[in-house]
Image (cartoon, rainbow, N blue to C red):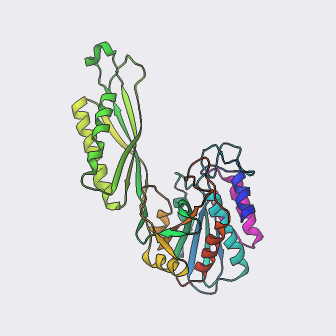
Amino acid sequence: MISVRRHIHADPELSSEEYSTSAFIERELAAFGLVTKKAHTGLIADIKGKGKDTVAFRADFDALPIAEKTGLPFASSNGNMHACGHDGHTAMLLGAAKYLSAHTPENNVRLIFQFGEEGDGGAETMIGHGATDGVDAVYAFHLCPELDKGRIGTNDSTLFAGVAEFDVIFEGKSAHCASRSEGVDALAAAAEFYKKLDSCRGSRANTLLHVGALAAGTARNVVACAAELKCSFRFFDKADMPPVLDDVRRLIENTDAAFGTTGRLDVRSVYPPLVNDAKCVGRLGKLTELTKTDGRYTAEDFAFYLERVPGCMAWLGVRDEKHDSALHSDTFDFDETVMLTGAELFIKLADTGV
């Protein structure tokens, strides 16, 4: 697992571009005698067990556009980095796959090596290619620098928020700033929208609305004829999304009425909340001590699998005296011995009742 992790870490590839990583995983699986099915760069493989039930395990393998600063001898030098532990996720599952292919498990096992977790929604493509067909339960682990090394953390409800990424565009009319009344100021409309956006949450306490970028105008002395806000809405209850987006649309209409602009809402992507199945969490809890963790406003596309199949995602702690850098940081690293914990739990889950 260490050699696999370091091979993947040294040559990280961005979402949907993981061609070399995919080919490497495919070669490893073939060496175990496993036949793979492709889903873009993703891979699906099955291990025949003794029983009729099928348990699936998922690992992601895309990297981030981050220049690595760990100083590791196997550090990436191509401007990308496995700063979210996906190299570890893949190595753990390949380790479990090697063992299970040589030691017939009680359950049938579906191996899901997923591309494009970091924003490309690769899970939906994997599902479209049959990743969850015939599956009775699905599990995944995610490395966690906030949890002590080797600890497993999860909960039996919502572990990650759902997210709707959207843009709001206002169109106005340009004019010289000396004759502002002849123009329609899209920037002013966008600024007003920005100030009032949080009101669209209403009384929904467990939600978050955020504007991360605002682009407008062409010159300092010209009334802006267009403005665009890039926004994110995060929620733990899927039922909160439609009414909040409806309120965003009404705010756009009210802003247009006040400023004379023409505004629109473009929803770019939607991830559902990641809701663990209580029974699956219970099965995991019989195999190892669990630390209860609160839900996070970050999103994870493993949620798409859990909309179709009961399952559980859990954190695998990596924090120790030497490793405490946050996920997505340019110094993220972990003690590779923790991968044994993840691989062993995959193996035990393959022999646990579904």
Q: Nearer the viewer, residue 176 or 91?
A: 91
Report the span colored magenta: 16-41
Q: Nearer the viewer, residue 176 or 83?
A: 83
Could one spot residue 105 in this view of the protein? yes
Q: What residue is at 28 percent from the left and 54 percent from the top? A: 243
Instruction: Point out residue 341 in the picture as x, y percentages from the top left corner.
Output: 62, 71
Determine whether 350 is above or below 342 in the image: below
Q: What residue is at 47 percent from the left and 74 percent from the top? A: 310
- Magenta span includes 32: yes
In terms of image quadrants, where is residue 324? Answer: bottom right
Q: Residue furthest right?
A: 31
Could one spot residue 128 in this view of the protein? no
Where's the N terminus, which quadrant?
A: bottom right
Left or right of 323: which side holds 269?
A: left
- Magenta span includes 20: yes
Left or right of 231: which side holds 87?
A: right
In terms of image quadrants, where is residue 225? Answer: top left
Q: Residue furthest top?
A: 178
Left or right of 76: which side holds 185?
A: left
Q: What residue is at 59 percent from the left and 69 percent from the top? A: 150
Instruction: Point out residue 305 in the picture as x, y percentages from the top left corner.
Output: 49, 66
